Image: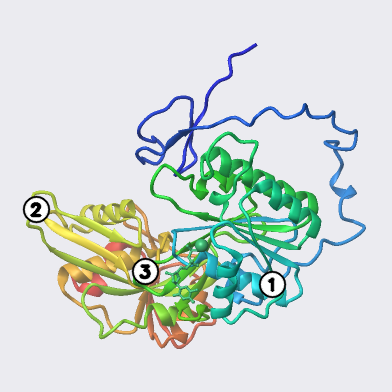
């Protein structure tokens, strides 16, 4: 018989290895690699019946009845991120830093789903039922017909769920769940995987939708949500900066809807409030037009969102100039600096560069390139861009500007918020947007000349 091989998994990113090491090669984290413990041998599995595992054709499925409709919480920001509501039998992971507001969000969601007629159980492994009830009271949700359970033993939870057969079960959090057939401590990779697997299988078998809460962890003792991302249908991350009251729920994977969709919330004294118009919120702190500040007309999922990029460029006192980025990709910043230098002859050597997205938002769209370049140039030359102008477009390594998707939606959003002109790549279709002066440019050199007269 082959010798059983050991496997090791990074608790931060889920990469697996066949030997231990101090640092994960995949994500670079230190001390996060843990040995996977095996599942103790139970009774031998019975031979599968003829029906299980047998194949069928697509047409055998679902002609007799259409799939059950999605359930809505009527928290619009949440329903949209889910792809239009909750799909029966789906498994959803909601990850986020501790204290960001996951329990608050899911308790509010549970209450709303329950009020709309969905039988809902909220299982807390972190708080006693009385504490959850107190929180519900404070949030004005005490009258919602949500059933509460405080439990961490997976077997007991599955027994309860099997008996009650709710339409929605929320497990807060997956790291506190404990399967008694796995020989390691709660929170370990093996435990988190086993519990997620059992709960996901339960969802598929019974039609209950299961939402798993996962804390993003910094140390290696507790497995993070990354290790279960592949098991679930939908992965949502709840993000935000401490000190900002905005929270963004972002779909990074969704089998039943578009990924990259975001929902925006604000943490208030009475829980999370929906933000229906995020552009207004992200631009609310913007003062007079100043050098280094540029408004980017972006698209997040299916919705246009305007955000402000702020850049600061100053002579560096250090031997190695600093590049600091918050809310955008630092590799992408390096690329834009290189293109500005190589194609337009504008060097940034010896200059410290700081780039920030206002409001704690994270932008990942390539169409932000031109807005970043504009902010950098504006800061470097100490010239403010014309007021009430939005900028978007992708920059290629040759310095050419590539048209962005959904030009029209971006312009409409800008117009709605009182902007009167836009700078964008040539070639983007913009029918039906009157009232906004559109300046379409072919390459970065043209942009520099036009805007800064360089
Ligand atoms: P919580 O939902 O417990 O976070 P998580 O489950 O992600 O760990 O939220 C904790 C924070 O939210 C806490 O610091 C206080 C804040 N909060 C409010 O500001 N208002 C509220 O109504 C609630 C319930 C929490
Ligand atoms: Mg919590």
Question: Closer to the observer: label 1 or label 2?
Answer: 1
Q: Residues within 10 Å of mark 1 (few under 14, many from 20)?
A: many
Please report contact status of discs 1 and 2: CB closer than 8 Å, yes or no.
no
Lower position in the chain sequence, tag 3 or tag 1: 1
From the image, tell me which residue sits under label 1: 113
- Mark 3 and mark 1: span between their CA atoms? 29 Å
Q: Secondary structure at mark 2?
A: loop
Q: Earlier in the sequence, mark 3 or mark 2?
A: 2
| Quarter where residue 371 is shown | bottom left
Left or right: 208 with respect to 60? Answer: left
Distance between the Cα atoms at labels 1 and 2? 56 Å
Q: Is 73 located above or below residue 203 in the figure? A: below
- Can residue 200 be seen? no
Q: Position of residue 173 (x, y in %)?
A: 56, 55
Front residue of this view, candidates 113 and 358: 113
The image's mark for residue 398 is none
Front-most of 349 and 111? Answer: 111
Residue that label 3 marks: 360
Image point (41%, 63%), residue name = 367
* Mark 3 vs mark 2, CA separation in Å: 28 Å
Q: In the image, what residue occupies the spot 69% across and 64% down?
A: 121
- Looking at the image, which residue is at 25% across and 52% down? 338
Q: Which residue is mark 2?
A: 318
Q: Are marks 3 and 1 in contact (CB under 8 Å)?
A: no
Side (left or right) of 400 relative to 163: left
Residue 399 point in image, percent of width and height: 31, 56
Q: Nearer the viewer, mark 3 or mark 2?
A: 3
Considering the numbered disc 1 on the image, is that residue within a helix, a strand or a loop? helix
């Amino acid at each position: 018989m082959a010798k059983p091989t050991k496997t090791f998994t990074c608790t931060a990113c889920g990469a697996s290895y066949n030997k231990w090491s101090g640092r994960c090669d995949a994500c670079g984290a230190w001390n996060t690699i843990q040995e996977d413990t095996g599942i103790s041998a139970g009774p031998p599995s019975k031979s599968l019946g003829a029906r299980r595992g047998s194949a069928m054709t697509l047409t055998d499925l679902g002609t007799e009845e259409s799939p059950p409709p999605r359930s809505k919480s009527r928290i619009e920001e949440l329903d949209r991120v889910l792809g239009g509501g909750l799909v029966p039998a789906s498994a959803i992971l909601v990850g986020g830093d501790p204290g960001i507001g996951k329990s608050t969000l899911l308790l509010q969601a549970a209450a709303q789903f329950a009020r709309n007629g969905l039988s809902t159980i909220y299982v807390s492994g972190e708080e006693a039922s009385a504490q959850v009830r107190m929180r519900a009271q404070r949030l004005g949700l005490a009258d919602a017909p949500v059933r509460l359970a405080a439990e961490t033993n997976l077997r007991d939870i599955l027994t309860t769920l099997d008996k009650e057969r709710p339409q929605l079960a929320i497990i807060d959090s997956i790291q506190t769940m404990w399967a008694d057939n796995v020989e390691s401590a709660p929170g370990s990779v093996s435990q988190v995987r086993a519990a997620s697997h059992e709960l996901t299988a339960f969802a598929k078998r019974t039609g209950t939708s299961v939402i798993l809460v996962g804390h993003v962890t910094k140390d290696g003792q507790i497995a993070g949500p990354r290790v279960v991302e592949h098991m679930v249908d939908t992965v949502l991350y709840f993000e935000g900066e401490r000190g900002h009251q905005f929270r963004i729920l972002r779909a990074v994977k969704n089998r039943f809807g578009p990924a990259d969709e975001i929902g925006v919330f604000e943490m208030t004294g009475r829980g999370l409030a929906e933000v229906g118009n995020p552009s207004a919120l992200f631009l609310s702190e913007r003062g007079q037009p100043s050098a280094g500040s540029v408004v980017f007309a972006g698209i997040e999922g299916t919705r246009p969102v305007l955000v402000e990029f702020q850049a600061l460029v100053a002579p560096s006192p250090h031997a190695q100039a600093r590049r600091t980025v918050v809310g955008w990709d630092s590799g992408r910043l390096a690329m834009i600096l290189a293109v500005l230098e190589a194609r337009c002859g504008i060097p940034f050597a010896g200059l410290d560069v700081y780039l920030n997205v206002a409001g704690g938002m994270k932008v990942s769209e390539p169409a932000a390139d031109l807005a970043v370049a504009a902010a950098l140039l504006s800061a470097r030359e100490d010239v403010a861009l014309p007021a009430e102008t939005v900028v978007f477009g992708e920059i290629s390594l040759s310095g050419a500007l590539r048209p962005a998707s959904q030009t029209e939606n971006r312009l409409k959003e800008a117009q709605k918020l009182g902007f009167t002109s836009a700078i964008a790549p040539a070639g983007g279709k913009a029918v039906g947007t009157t009232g906004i002066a559109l300046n379409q440019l072919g390459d970065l050199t043209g942009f520099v000349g036009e805007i800064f007269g360089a």
